[in-house]
Image (spheres, helix red, strand yellow):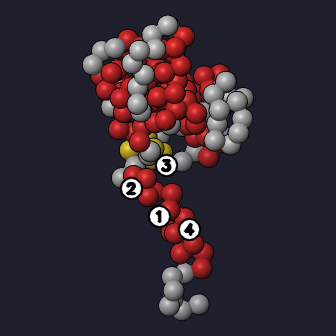
Amino acid sequence: PSALGRGFLCSCGTLEGHIEPVASGTGLKDLYNRRCEEAGDEDLPAADGAEVAARAAAGEELARRTLTDSARALGECVGGMGNLIDPDVIVVSGSVVKAGPIWWDALRAGFADSALALVKPTPLVEGELGGAAPLIGAAAAVHRRIGAPGDAR
Ligand SMILES: [Zn+2]
């Protein structure tokens, strides 16, 4: 579990500290808005993760810290996964990959902190398929397993 995610409701139903509710685009916004509340600054909640990223890029300290914490926690999780499966490359996608260099630097720092020496050089790259990636991946897996319609069996 991620200490950062504790107390944030994950789409799977737990509050026990999954990474999604603080590392997705929506999660980034939720983490930021909660921190604004805690700081007594509830006047201007961010509408989405992109807005948090924009505020961070403009130099707002809380947005910058939130973006960094979120990406770093995600990078630590990804490093743990890399340690298990030792991939050649790690493709990261979703709206948050558009959050800019602050996010990417923190993601890579978190990854480097948790990846074993053997895994540390693994490149982390931005996915090119956007939101369609899971569907395209599922279709590719099915195609590999059963072939395309009309293929000889
Ligand atoms: Zn979950």
Q: Identify residue for label 3.
A: 88
Quote the CA–CA distance across marks 1 and 2: 8 Å
Image point 50% across, 68% down: which residue?
A: 140
Marks 1 and 2 close (CB-CB < 8 Å)? yes
Image point 52% across, 69% down: which residue?
A: 139
Question: Where is the C terminus found, in terms of image quarters?
Answer: bottom right
Q: Identify residue for label 1.
A: 136
| Quadrant of residue 57 within the rendered picture | top left
Callout 3 environment at 10 Å: few (<14), some (14 to 19), or many (20+)?
few
Select label 1 or label 4 by which is in front: 1
Q: Earlier in the sequence, mark 1 or mark 2?
A: 2
Q: Earlier in the sequence, mark 4 or mark 2?
A: 2
The total of numbered circles placed on residues is 4
Callout 2 environment at 10 Å: few (<14), some (14 to 19), or many (20+)?
few
Image point 46% across, 36% down: which residue?
A: 25
| Quadrant of residue 133 within the rendered picture | bottom left
Is residue 104 or residue 132 the one in the foreground? 132
Q: Is residue 24 above or below residue 127?
A: above
The kind of secondary structure element at disc 4 is helix
Quote the CA–CA distance across marks 4 and 3: 19 Å
The kind of secondary structure element at disc 1 is helix
Select label 1 or label 3 by which is in front: 1
The three-letter amino acid code for the residue at tag 1 is Ile
The three-letter amino acid code for the residue at tag 2 is Leu
Q: Identify residue for label 4.
A: 141
